[in-house]
Amino acid sequence: MIIVRPVREDDLDSLYDLAREAYPGMTTLPPDRDALAAKIELSSTSVAKAVEKPGNEVYMLVMEDTATGAVVGTASVIASLGEVEPFYSYKLNKVTHKSRVLDKKVTVATLNLSNHFEGFAEVATLFLSPAYRRDGNGKLLARSRYLLMAAHRQRFPKEVMADLRGHYEDGGRSPFWEAVGRHFFEMEFAEADVFGALHGNQFIAELMPTQPVYVNLLPADAQAVIGRVNSAGEPALELLEREGFRWQGHVDIFDAAPSVDAEIDNLATVAATRRGTLAGPLEDDAAALPTLVAAGSIDRFTACLVPALEADGGLRLPAEAIEVLPVGPGEALWYTEL
């Protein structure tokens, strides 16, 4: 059976294999044992905390194939951005200049360094092994993060954002980085991206100028990618938009990818999630519907995608789901139809 649960210390080897599979496209999942061990420790500390207000917690979830015990996917939720170091993005604005002598008005776009997303949650580091991209596993992995937020709402703030991968050319060249970032950081785009993922982005504040960047002064290829997601990230953007995420003009400072956001309570999965109880096993001939189901305290949170049926004031589940979910008869669970 396929389940999603919080990462554990004994997942390190399996998570390392998954990171090698994701490399080099996902810098937040580096094939580095020390970095992965640190992520596991932070997540383990986060689920062990009694939280009344979101802070410096990061919840790292993994998808497990219970038949083999292998970790085949991962997804994370950062509870509140900017708790330790400032979180930076660019905000796309407009500035109008007018000359009375020439009787001419010119409106140009600018990029302004912003800390707008501080205090937002972030859904991040979504990766599923290609061999498991079937049978609704991708939807389970992505939406398990929203079930987590719905089931443990007090641990998360009002709003959530997501960063996407910006457009880059064959060979990994980022037109926006070449036009802006390279001049101040004197390193390759991939190097800066990995450094930020491993060490935080305080170095942005230390080296990046705070003055607005006039978009019309950038090369045409750099202008063209502002707010544009890479083709490989288009399915991820579509999933986010289905949940209710929208682009409000904020872009990533490295590659100008769109940063989208939404109110957590308005996310499609959160709004549709219902709380119920376990009513018992599902009969073989029952007219069940594919359902995302989650149960357990934050440290034992487990989600799965199974046929389920609302009945007797609760939810009837297949025997295998009852076996893996940390819930007993009459105990609470959260669910929403696929």
Image (cartoon, rainbow, N blue to C red):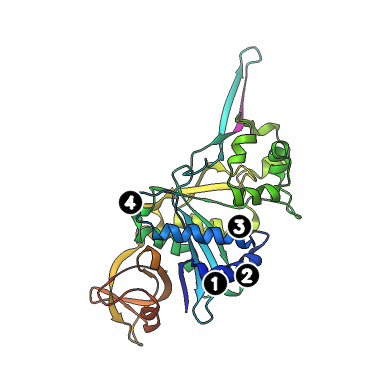
Label 3: element kind: helix
For disc 2, the marked residue is: 17
For disc 3, the marked residue is: 233
- Tell me the CA gap for discs 4 and 3: 34 Å
Label 1: element kind: strand
- Tell me the CA gap for discs 1 and 4: 30 Å
Nearer the camera: disc 2 or disc 3: 2
Q: Is residue 101 above or below residue 42?
A: above
First-in-chain label (4 vs 3): 4
First-in-chain label (2 vs 3): 2
Residue 128: x and y in percent read 57, 67
- Tell me the CA gap for discs 2 and 4: 35 Å
Amino acid marked by disc 1 = Val
- Tell me the CA gap for discs 1 and 3: 22 Å
Q: Are marks 2 and 3 in contact (CB under 8 Å)?
A: no
Can residue 278 be seen here?
A: yes
Which residue is at the front of the view, 102 or 81?
Answer: 81
Dominant SS in magenta: strand
First-in-chain label (1 vs 4): 4
What is the crowding at mark 3: few (fewer than 14 residues within 10 Å), some, or many (at least 20)? some
What is the crowding at mark 4: few (fewer than 14 residues within 10 Å), some, or many (at least 20)? few
For disc 4, the marked residue is: 52
Label 2: element kind: helix
What's drawn in magenta, residue-wise?
104-111
First-in-chain label (1 vs 3): 1
For disc 1, the marked residue is: 71
Q: Do the residues labelled 1 and 4 touch (CB within 8 Å)?
A: no
Quarter location, residue 320: bottom left
Nearer the camera: disc 4 or disc 3: 4
In reply to whether residue 37 is colored magenta, the answer given is: no
Q: Do the residues labelled 2 and 1 touch (CB within 8 Å)?
A: yes
